[in-house]
Amino acid sequence: QVQLQESGPGLVKPSETLSLTCTVSGASINIWHWGWIRQSPGKELEWIGNIYDSGKTNFNPSLKSRASISVDKSKNQFSLKLSSVTAADTAVYYCASLRFLGWFDPWGQGTLVTVSS
Amino acid sequence: DIQLTQSPSSLSVSVGDRVTITCQATQDISKYLNWYQQKPGRAPKLLIYDASNLETGVPSRFSGSGSGTNFIFTISSLQPEDLGTYYCQQYDDLPTFTFGPGTKVDLK
């Protein structure tokens, strides 16, 4: 059974870089595809980006190249970095497995990141 | 970019009611439409993939249909544990993914 768990700082200052890690258990990080999705308080889900088993990444164009995703095979983890954050980046951030290149399942429990000075 | 709209945005129902939610895409997305359930304070859970395929372990009272631009999600007989927000998500426009705005289902 695949399980995911997000971790990282819950508070980030404006203009700094948000960094989150997703630890995967029950599956090899090498052979699956992975994604990040966020949800601002009371709002809808917003896809951030994916990293594929090839190492290729894709991102939501609305993030204007602020996002990056990488994999640490030795730790079976993948990570999200979002630069130059503002209050608009305050959200619950979820990591998820991208199955068959089409749907996200399962998801981590999510972690709230607040951008504030 | 493909946009998704859902209707209604919210609905109040009774246990045992039939619930129908629609998701409309701004262009043809074939069958590439999925449905998720999100309970308050919890992560979304996949219910239906590729418009009409029930994810393993999901109760058969949930179903989906449609293709092209119009999709329907149905709960045949609402149970108390079904309360929450339901989202559609498309993946025809790869490599980008889009979620709908959600439909909140609560009790009358």
Image: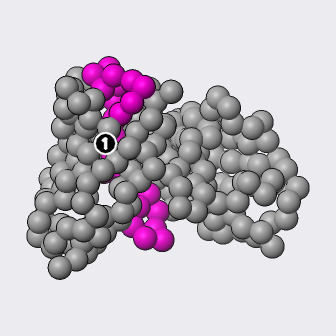
**Where the C terminus of chain B falls, by quadrant?**
bottom right
Identify the residue at horizontal 85%, vertical 60% (top origin): B15
On screen, residue B53 versus residue A90, left or right, reads right
Query: Seen in the image, is B10 located left or right of residue A22?
Result: right
Residue at the spot 62% in from the left edge and 40% down from the top edge: B47
Name the residue that disc number 1 marks.
A22
- The percent coordinates of residue B93 (x first, y second) are 38, 41
Residue that appears at 20% across and 72% down: A86
Instruction: Determine which quarter of the picture holds residue A78.
Output: top left
Q: Position of residue A114 (x, y in %)?
A: 29, 70
Residue at 74% over, 42% down: B62
Residue A71 spot, x, y in % from top left: 20, 33
Residue B79 lies in the magenta stretch: no
> Which residue occupies the foreground of this view, B32 or A89?
A89
Is residue B36 shown above or below A103?
below
> What's the coloring here?
one colour
| Tag 1 subunit | A
User: Is residue B83 visible to the viewer in this orientation of the structure?
Assistant: yes
Q: Amino acid at mark 1?
A: Cys
Magenta-highlighted residues: A24-48
Q: Give yes or no for residue A27 being in the magenta stretch.
A: yes
SS of the residue at dot 1?
Answer: strand
Is B71 placed left or right of B98 in the picture? right
Residue furthest bottom in the image: A117
Please tell me which residue lies in front, B19 or A55. A55
